[in-house]
Amino acid sequence: MNITASVFINDNESGLYYDDDNWLEELAPFDPSPERYHHNSTGEDNADAHHKRQIMGREVVVAITDGKLHLGPWEHIFYYEFDGRRRKRILVKIIGE
């Protein structure tokens, strides 16, 4: 529950981590100056982290079957923080029977 963090489902593979980091950095490169991102003129320097979170999303919905997460064979749930300077909180809600 942080405005610069994402939760998503993907393959747990190191090459994919590398590719994701590079892809996100191309889309929203870190630049603390207000010239690139107007948000940074407010005293913050993390506008790129907000954009990365928008791209990656903020939540996942996963079915539970027979008491186990119903994920594909290579799927994992990831928490990714794009601005690591803040305290984090994770909320897990279970809805259903």
Image (cartoon, helix red, strand yellow):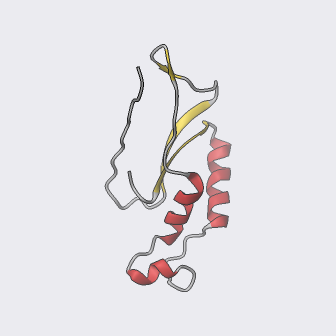
Residue lying farthest to the front in this orientation: 96
Compared across the picture, whether 33 is left or right of 20 comes to left
Residue 21 spot, x, y in % from top left: 61, 55
Q: Quadrant of the C terminus?
A: top left
Residue lying at 53% horizontally and 68% vertically, measured from the top left: 48
Residue located 38% across and 36% down the image: 92
The number of numbered badges drawn on the structure is 0
Q: Residue 70: image x %, image y %? A: 55, 23
Direction from residue 16 to residue 51 in the image, left or right:
left
Instruction: Determine whether 93 is above or below 25 in the image.
Output: above
Q: Height in image: 72 above or below 20? A: above
Q: Residue at x 39, y 55 (%)?
A: 2
Q: Return the residue nearer the eye: 45 or 62.
A: 62
Percent position (x, y) of residue 9? 57, 39
Left or right position of 97 against 87? right
Of 97 and 83, which appears nearest the observer? 97
In the figure, 30 relative to 52: above or below? below
Q: What is the x, y in percent for residue 64?
A: 49, 22
Find the residue positioned furthest to the top. Answer: 66
